[in-house]
Amino acid sequence: MVSKKSRQEVRVKKHMKTRNRFSGTAERPRLSVFRSNNHMYAQIIDDTVGNTLVAASTLEKDVKSELEKTNNVDAAAYLGTLIAKRAIEKGIKEVVFDRGGFIYQGKIQALADAAREAGLEF
């Protein structure tokens, strides 16, 4: 009988493979994305020091009040524009995109496209 790994285990393994290939620097930090069943989270991280430079999530009160639901494509797009605006305010224009082991479609793609349209380069 063949045992099948859980989706969570597969996602974490994919994420670790991509994290071995690249990391964020001070000049070009990493835009890390995580999505749960109910919310989405985005951080811009400098891996050389281990600091989070900018963060945004659908858990924040002002973000939650703007959205009808916190786990759909519209929420992801709003979060992408928000994280890009906050990054540009801090002087960050170029990032490395870390999709967190998730496949690049749907919510992850919407967040990335919105961040690009708002001025981030990756």
Image: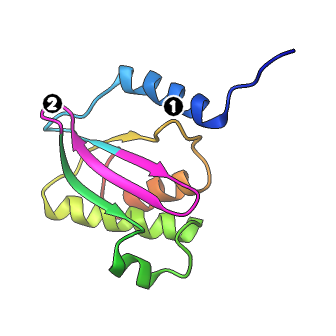
Residue 49 vertical position relative to residue 90 in the rendered view, above or below: above
Q: Is residue 65 left or right of residue 70?
A: left
Residue depicted at x 17% and y 36%? 50
Which image quarter: residue 69? Answer: bottom right
Judged from the image, the secondary structure of the residue bearing numbered disc 1 is helix
Residue depicted at x 13% and y 59%? 90
Judged from the image, the secondary structure of the residue bearing numbered disc 2 is loop
Residue 100 vertical position relative to residue 3 in the rendered view, above or below: below
Of pointers 1 and 2, the one earlier in the residue sequence = 1
Which residue in the protein does label 1 denote?
A: 12
Q: Is residue 39 left or right of residue 50?
A: right
Of residue 51 and residue 90, the one placed in the foreground of this image is: 51
The image position of residue 112, as x and y in percent, is 45, 53
Q: Is residue 1 left or right of residue 84?
A: right
The type of residue carrying mark 2 is Thr
Q: Residue furthest top?
A: 1
Residue depicted at x 28% and y 29%? 23
Mark 1 nearby-residue class (10 Å; few <14, some 14–19, many ≥20): some
User: Which quadrant is home to the C terminus?
Assistant: top left
Residue depicted at x 46% and y 22%? 17
User: Which quadrant is home to the N terminus?
Assistant: top right
Magenta part of the chain: 32-50
Which residue in the protein does label 2 denote?
A: 48
The image position of residue 85, as x and y in percent, is 26, 66
The type of residue carrying mark 1 is Val
Of residue 1 and residue 102, the one placed in the foreground of this image is: 1
The image's mark for residue 91 is: none
Alpha-carbon distance for marks 1 and 2?
22 Å
The image position of residue 109, as x and y in percent, is 54, 52
Residue 59 vertical position relative to residue 28 in the rendered view, above or below: below
Mark 2 nearby-residue class (10 Å; few <14, some 14–19, many ≥20): few
